[in-house]
Image (cartoon, rainbow, N blue to C red):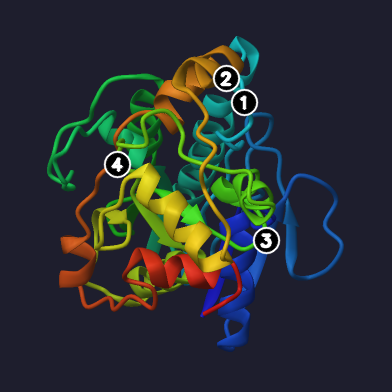
Amino acid sequence: MRILVSGASGLIGSAFAEHMRTKGHTVVALVRREAKNSDEISWAPGHEPLQAGVVDTFDAVVNLAGATTGKLPWTKKYMRELIDSRIDSTRALVEAMRSANQRPKVFVSGSASGFYGDTGTANAKETDPKGTGFLSDLAAKWEQMAYTAPSDVRVVTIRTTMVMSRKKGALGRMLPLLRMGVGGRLGSGKQWWAFISLVDEVRAIEHLIETPSASGAFNLTAPEAATCEELVSSLGKALHRPTLLPVPAFALRLAFGLGADELLLCNQKLDAGKLVASGFEFTHPTLDAASRWSVGRD
């Protein structure tokens, strides 16, 4: 296949591009600078449209562009950037598909588990309504823009949760502390944290591209649920380090404001049933398996 990817320099995008290239596919990245070779195409979403015919030769478009929500605290200016970086990129790709002479078969576009807001103790399913809060509104707007793609393009929106990685992403700040034995739960630790390994995140995107019956929203989450305390303890166990130094909720709110409540202290408990029913098999279905891989001890 020929696959066009936005956000290819990010954690998920770079891993996805590398994975697909090892499978023999051609991956071309959209970059916000001058293209250096045939594996790159320059673009400036929000400022100018993609050149005519850009998407004509691609079988799939994967849209992972967007400023990271992990940059805390969120200022009003940065919250605007979080919105614009997603909506402008998605709009540019949709408009390019509308004007294409030959459209891609599938459009996989990013979203987030934040769509559901605070899920409480329930396993959120794709048929559940959106929740409340900034991240919920952001994810809903992002998806709505993706679904304006032409009707003959299969659209999949991936509601990604916390991605467990060996170097960056959600655990980027936590892992170094845990390696030193000075980490612990955040807040009460009882809040649910949905998770997925970077390996399964990338493989799930590949699976959804290659499964013609897959369309609409999919939760990209491991099938096993875990609390914040369980996840931190599992990582500590994999590292053979104690996890006895909690960070109180008030300190997180003082440091990170709204981001603390919406990213770190709220419940995110998701159901993986739709992804599993589509035929996907997890490499790291359990917390311990994902933790061992994340610390390099699988």
Badge 2 vs badge 4, beta-carbon distance below 8 Å: no
Residue 160: x and y in percent read 39, 50
Residue 9: x and y in percent read 69, 55
For residue 295, which numbered disc appears in the image? none
Residue in the image at 59% along x and 11% along y: 76
Q: Which of disc 4 and disc 2 is earlier in sequence?
A: 4
* Depicted 130 relative to depicted 152: above or below: above
Q: Disc 3 to disc 2, how far (Cα)?
A: 33 Å
Q: Disc 2 to disc 4, how far (Cα)?
A: 19 Å
Give residue 267's quadrant in the image. Answer: top left
Residue in the image at 65% along x and 43% along y: 173
Badge 3 vs badge 1, beta-carbon distance below 8 Å: no
Residue 288: x and y in percent read 39, 68
For residue 256, which numbered disc appears in the image? 2
Residue 25 is left or right of residue 270, and the answer is: right
Say whether residue 102 is visible: no
For residue 72, which numbered disc appears in the image? 1
In front: label 4 or label 3: 4
Kindly identify which residue carries mark 4. Answer: 192
Badge 2 vs badge 1, beta-carbon distance below 8 Å: yes
> Mark 4 belongs to which amino acid?
Trp
Q: Which of disc 1 and disc 3 is earlier in sequence?
A: 3
Q: Disc 4 to disc 3, how far (Cα)?
A: 35 Å
* Depicted 56 relative to depicted 30: above or below: below
Mark 3, secondary structure of its residue: strand
> Mark 3 belongs to which amino acid?
Ala
In front: label 4 or label 1: 4
Q: Which of disc 1 and disc 2 is earlier in sequence?
A: 1
Q: Residues within 10 Å of mark 1 (few under 14, many from 20)?
A: some
For residue 29, which numbered disc appears in the image? 3
Residue lying at the far bottom of the rendered structure: 24
